[in-house]
Image (cartoon, grey):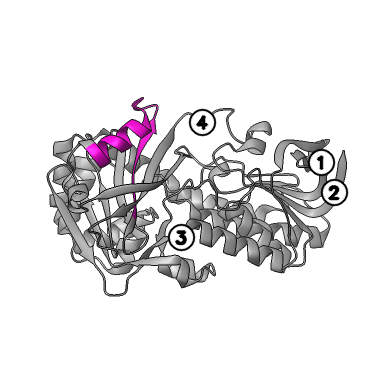
């Protein structure tokens, strides 16, 4: 048994864990981050779609971002597009971004241990005091002042502590090919809502370069039991979707797959000496399943909370309340997002055609910032009222007849 002591131990080197490690180390904490895999950024479990303003604020270099100008929303028989000269969105090079974040964390002094599988929390009465893990050189016991669960969908520590249910009641199962595409508009993303290509979910075409795109599907469980890979192959090779056809020759290079919880953020994201972030706290946006941005922001907030608490010599749940406030703000957006997502999944193809043509298609008066806010899933009554004032007919149809909010 190897013994390690530190201020902050982080289970999981995804975007949230790496952001927390970087921030914590930059603030002078002795940080250890544990990653089960032997390579940062592998396997890929996310599409990597995000927003340029946010990636810049999070310190992600532009060289890792394929900038997006046009967003296309499509149903079975209808589609509309919105273009912006500012290129406000992007699709990220996931491995490049994650490894950049790892470099930054280590540059600030964090210690990264690959091939280390976290097994359980160490408890001291009601206080979380670190983790037990299995590493390349055998068993390891990491004693820490604060522990962060950034293990993603498994939420290993959160489930052990009862912060999260033992199993997720609802989640999105997604899969995509990163593929060579013969004819690709590299500045355009396409989001497709139709039951043939994505039963109980949506499909997408997200370019990562001039000739490569991530083409995928995601479906809610347990709403459908159709295997995700079967849905993916049907979408890419069998169903004859017009947008896939326009790509010409499509040759898969990589397969990415992963699950995202689509359930309320836990009421308790902190315990004495413990916080959970990202997918380990169900913080991905319910409608789009976007998780990187929220995970990184939560990782930074958790690291700041840990640094403040450790400086005071009190790492109780109450002392970590700075992070609780952040998590509650994310939860507020997600509550309305879950309602929107549930209703969208219930819509027939005919109703989805109506949404695309008569609701989304008529929202030409909303600003770029308002559209980006909607795409982020940051739904609020204030935003909806603002949009309603500019587009009364479209929003009235959406709220009363389609979304039924």
What residue is rendered at 45% in x and 48% in y?
Answer: 46
Contact? badges 3 and 4 (CB < 8 Å): no
Mark 1 and 2 residues: CB-CB less than 8 Å, in contact? yes
Residue 168: image tag = 4
Residue 178: x and y in percent read 38, 50
Q: Considering the numbered disc 3 on the image, is that residue within a helix, a strand or a loop?
A: loop
Mark 1 vs mark 4: give the one in front.
1
Q: Which residues, given as a range, are shown in magenta?
A: 213-237
Query: Is residue 196 at least partly visible in the picture?
Result: yes
Q: Secondary structure at mark 2?
A: strand
Upstream in sequence: badge 1 or badge 3: 3
- Secondary structure under badge 4? loop
Which residue occupies the foreground of this view, 289 or 365?
289
Spatial separation of the CA atoms under disc 1 and disc 2: 7 Å
Crowdedness near tag 2: few (<14), some (14–19) or many (≥20) residues, C-alpha within 10 Å: few
Q: Earlier in the sequence, mark 3 or mark 4?
A: 3
- Residue corresponding to mark 1: 140
SS state under label 1: strand
Query: As rendered, which of 124 and 405 lies closer to the eye?
Result: 124
Q: Is residue 273 left or right of residue 335?
A: right
Pair 4/2: label in front: 2
**Vertical comparison of 150 with 21: above or below:** above
Query: From the viewer's perspective, is 27 left or right of 176?
Result: right
The Cα–Cα distance between marks 3 and 4, rounded to whole angstroms, is 29 Å
User: Which residue carries the number 2 mark?
Assistant: 4
Q: Which residue is mark 3?
A: 93
Q: Position of residue 8 (x, y in %)?
A: 76, 54
The mark that comes first in sequence, 1 or 4, is 1
């Amino acid at each position: 048994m190897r013994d390690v002591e530190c201020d902050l131990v982080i289970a999981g080197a995804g975007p949230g864990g790496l952001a927390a490690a970087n921030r914590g180390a930059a603030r002078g904490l002795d940080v250890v981050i544990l990653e089960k895999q032997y390579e940062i950024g592998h396997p890929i479990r996310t599409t990597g779609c995000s927003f340029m303003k946010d990636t810049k604020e999070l310190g992600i270099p532009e060289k890792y971002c394929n900038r997006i100008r046009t967003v296309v929303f499509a149903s079975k028989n209808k589609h509309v597009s919105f273009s912006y000269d500012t290129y406000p969105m992007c699709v990220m090079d996931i491995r490049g971004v994650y490894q950049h974040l790892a470099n930054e964390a280590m540059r600030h002094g964090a210690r990264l241990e690959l091939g280390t599988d976290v097994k359980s929390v160490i408890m001291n009465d009601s206080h979380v005091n670190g983790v037990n893990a299995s590493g390349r050189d055998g068993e390891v016991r990491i004693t820490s002042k604060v522990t962060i669960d950034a293990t993603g969908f498994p939420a290993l520590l959160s489930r052990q502590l009862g912060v999260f249910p033992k199993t997720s009641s609802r989640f999105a199962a997604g899969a995509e090919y990163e593929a060579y595409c013969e004819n690709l508009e590299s500045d355009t993303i396409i989001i497709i809502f139709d039951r043939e290509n994505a039963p109980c979910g949506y499909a997408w075409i997200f370019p990562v370069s001039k000739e490569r795109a991530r083409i995928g599907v995601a479906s809610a469980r347990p709403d459908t039991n159709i295997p995700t890979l079967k849905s993916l192959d049907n979408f890419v090779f069998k169903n004859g979707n017009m947008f896939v056809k326009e790509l010409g020759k499509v040759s898969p290079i990589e397969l990415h797959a992963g699950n995202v919880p689509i359930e309320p953020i836990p009421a308790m994201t902190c315990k004495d000496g413990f916080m959970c972030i990202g997918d380990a706290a169900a913080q991905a946006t319910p409608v789009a399943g976007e998780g990187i941005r929220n995970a990184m922001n939560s990782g930074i907030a958790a690291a700041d909370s840990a640094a403040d608490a450790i400086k005071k010599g009190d790492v109780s749940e109450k002392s970590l309340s700075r992070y609780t406030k952040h998590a509650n703000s994310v939860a507020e957006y997600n509550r309305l997002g879950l309602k929107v997502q549930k209703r969208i999944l219930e819509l027939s193809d005919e109703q989805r055609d109506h949404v695309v043509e008569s609701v989304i298609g008529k929202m030409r008066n909303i600003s770029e910032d308002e559209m980006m806010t909607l795409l982020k899933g940051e739904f609020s009554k204030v935003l909806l009222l603002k949009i309603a004032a500019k587009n009364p007919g479209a929003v009235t149809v959406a709220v009363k007849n389609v979304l039924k909010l």
